[in-house]
């Protein structure tokens, strides 16, 4: 019997494992869904309240006949009004919302006709107490336990309680910026406790110069931040990195000090080393430049007594920081020499060569 059941047994075992895995995943997903189920429910009850307001001034529709007037008071509590509100609870595309409304439609009817007066807060009655997807504010999890720091002021007002107001989460605190610790009563580095007792803490930012501090000024630092140093009065002041030896910047840069830092900027191209921006702050002039009344200025190599371009039929063209030697009009470069442009070319070719050899072709 057992042997013949081999394949079926294997199949059964496989199915069993599959179901286990699926259950495990489903359980995991369910935990995450607990928060979103509450927010879906919250959205539904918010929309219910909006619908309630929207329909407040309506009646059964049609003209204002005496009959309608008599019925007006009944519309307020009518099934028609409830249906009109329920229709608008969810976006058509929101599966979770529509599913929740359909699943619990009878609860809305119960509340509308029987509980509304006694339990006017629909969210509390529906989401928290009836379908149990939410918890009262300041509580979390399946049993709506108090958040860390208490339900009154979760995380002592300095953070968010995980799962607050839902059936999910773990009730732990995600502290606001500046706060740390399980209860969000401690200050992170760079902040100090301006006010602190067992249930209340106010952390304020330290002065920009402090790594840690006990007060707001640069004299209250426990430790200076990088880029700052203690002066004679034990206050943290900016380090002027630009006065340091050896220099913090490279030779072709100048240094710019700033509060808590510094930067290195490239020298002007006319400079070989500089003390600031511009060609008048050079320590020496770069090659191709000369000092003219304290400013490094381009040397016009072409107008010097020694000719810069020495080959035959060459002319000199000055440019910023240098110069070039080019062949004069009617000449072209061949193997480093300027040779006469050949005249035996056809009309088209010579036209071409004229356009390519410009601008000095016109000289
Ligand atoms: Ca500095
Ligand atoms: Ca030049």
Image: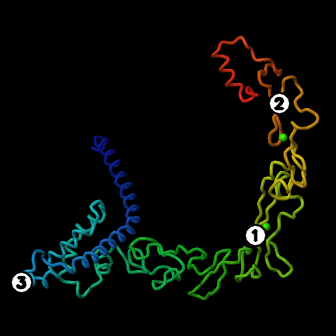
Would residue 200 be found to the left or right of residue 296 on screen? left
> For the residue carrying disc 1, how many other residues have a C-alpha within 10 Å: few (<14), some (14-19), or many (20+)?
few
Q: Residue at x 76, y 28 (%)?
A: 363
Element under label 1? loop
* Separation of residues labelled 2 and 1 (CA atoms): 50 Å
**Label 2 belongs to which residue?**
325
Upstream in sequence: badge 3 or badge 2: 3
- For residue 66, which numbered disc appears in the image? 3
Residue 242 appears at what percent x and percent y?
84, 63
In the depicted view, which residue is nearer to us: 72 or 144? 72
Residue 326 appears at what percent x and percent y?
80, 28
Q: Residue at x 85, y 56 (%)?
A: 280
Element under label 3? helix
Q: Quadrant of ligand 1?
A: bottom right
* Separation of residues labelled 3 and 1 (CA atoms): 80 Å
In the depicted view, which residue is nearer to us: 207 or 54? 54
Element under label 2? strand
Q: Residue at x 32, y 45 (%)?
A: 11
Image position of 117 with respect to 337: above or below: below
- For residue 259, which numbered disc appears in the image? 1
When asked about the image quadrant of residue 91, the answer is bottom left
Residue 246 appears at what percent x and percent y?
89, 58
């Amino acid at each position: 019997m057992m042997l013949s059941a081999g394949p079926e047994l294997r199949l059964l075992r496989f199915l069993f494992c599959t179901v286990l895995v699926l259950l495990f995943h489903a359980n995991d997903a369910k935990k995450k869904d607990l928060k979103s189920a509450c927010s879906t429910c919250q959205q539904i009850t918010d929309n219910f309240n909006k619908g309630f307001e929207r329909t407040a001034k309506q009646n059964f529709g049609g003209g204002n006949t005496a009959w309608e007037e008599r019925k007006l008071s009944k519309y307020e509590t009518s099934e028609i009004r409830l249906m009109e509100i329920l229709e608008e609870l969810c976006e058509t595309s929101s599966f979770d919302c529509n599913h929740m409304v359909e699943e619990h439609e009878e609860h809305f009817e119960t509340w509308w006709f029987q509980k509304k007066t006694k339990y006017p807060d629909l969210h509390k009655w529906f989401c928290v107490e009836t379908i149990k997807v939410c918890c009262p504010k300041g509580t979390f999890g399946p049993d709506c336990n108090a958040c860390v720091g208490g339900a009154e002021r979760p995380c002592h007002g300095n953070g968010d309680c995980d799962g607050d107001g839902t059936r999910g989460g773990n009730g732990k605190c995600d502290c606001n910026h500046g706060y740390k610790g399980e209860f969000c009563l401690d200050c992170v580095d760079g902040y100090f406790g301006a006010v602190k007792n067992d249930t209340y803490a106010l952390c304020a930012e330290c002065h920009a110069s402090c790594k840690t501090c006990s007060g707001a000024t640069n004299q209250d630092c426990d430790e200076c931040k990088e880029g700052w140093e203690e002066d004679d009065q034990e206050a943290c002041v900016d380090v002027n990195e630009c006065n340091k030896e050896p220099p913090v910047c490279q030779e072709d840069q100048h240094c710019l000090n700033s509060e808590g830092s510094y930067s290195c900027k490239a020298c002007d191209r006319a400079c070989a080393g500089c003390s600031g921006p511009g060609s008048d702050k050079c320590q020496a002039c770069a090659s191709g430049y000369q000092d003219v009344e304290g400013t490094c200025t381009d040397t016009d190599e072409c107008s010097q007594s020694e000719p810069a371009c020495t080959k035959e039929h060459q002319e000199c063209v000055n440019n910023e920081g240098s110069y070039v030697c080019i062949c004069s009009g009617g000449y072209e470069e061949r193997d480093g020499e300027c040779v006469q442009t050949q005249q035996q070319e056809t009309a088209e070719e010579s036209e071409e060569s004229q356009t390519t050899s410009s601008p000095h072709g016109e000289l």
